[in-house]
Amino acid sequence: MPKEITTVILKALQFAARKHETQRRKDVAASPYINHPIEVANLLAEVGDVTDVDILVAAILHDTLEDTKTTPEELEQHFGLDVRLIVEGLTDDKQLGKEVRKQLQIKHASRLSGRAKVIKLADKVCNIEDVIERPPADWPLERRKDYLDWTEKVVHGCRGTNALLESCYDQLLKAGRSALHGAPE
């Protein structure tokens, strides 16, 4: 990998780690939040065979606008307009209620750029894996099942972007449904 590519990916990792440094995931172990964007970028590269540096950088930064005090201008200054636009496309408006945001994700998924769609797909794969294997401590079984159903609606709008990730999602969704339907209430 050329040095400039390595440098920008490491810069994005450092930037995201600083922005998310006090945040934790909702699992029982309260895992460091930074693990999630790293998992998304890794899934894109390993499973999705994605080599587009802007996609990988945007994957690392995909929650910075939504979950930190990062501004779009700051992203553009450090990582360029393309990365900013990809991340903005993936960012929910936190001023809206949770249910409204979820419905908007379904509605807007098909309108995302191809680059944003592939990140959204990888994000949903990582999230359903967490909901199956390391669920939020306060999520009952029914909420976990509902989450899987909701991701399917979002992913539907992202189909046609990366067959490898779509296959991974489909397999994980099937396994997750089987595991959750057999789980004790």
Image (cartoon, rainbow, N blue to C red):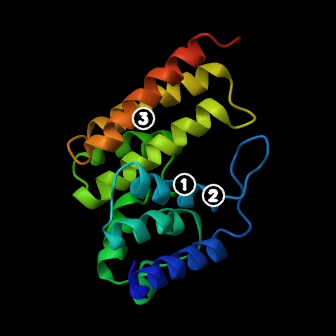
Query: Residue drawn 68% across and 51% down?
Result: 25
Q: What element carries label 2?
A: helix
- Say which amino acid is labelled 3: Thr
- Residue 65, label in figure: none
Q: What number is the disc on residue 39?
A: 1
Residue 156 lies left or right of residue 181; in this view the side is left
Where is residue 28 drawn, in percent x and y?
Answer: 78, 40
Tell me, yes or no, whether the two marked residues, 2 and 1, touch with CB atoms within 8 Å.
yes
Question: Which label's residue is closer to the chain start, 3 or 2?
Answer: 2
Image quadrant for the N terminus? bottom left
Residue bearing mark 2 = 35
Percent across and percent down for residue 74 are: 47, 85
Q: In this orientation, does residue 128 appear?
A: yes
Please name which of the two marks, 3 or 2, marks the residue nearer to the observer.
2
Up/down of 77 relative to 128, above or below: below
Per the model, the C-alpha gap separating discs 3 and 2 is 20 Å
Q: Which of 97 and 6 is in front in this view?
A: 6
Q: Earlier in the sequence, mark 1 or mark 3?
A: 1
Mark 3 highlights which residue?
151
Q: Nearer the viewer, residue 182 or 77?
A: 182
* Quarter location, residue 8: bottom left
Q: Which of 93 and 14 is in front in this view?
A: 14
Q: Within 10 Å of the Cα at label 1, are there few (<14), some (14-19), or many (20+) other Cα atoms?
A: some
Image depth: mark 1 or mark 3 in front: 1
State the separation of the CA atoms marked 2 and 1. Answer: 6 Å
At 36% from the left and 75% from the top, the residue drawn is 84
Q: Which residue is drawn at 50% across and 22% down?
A: 175
The type of residue carrying mark 2 is Asn
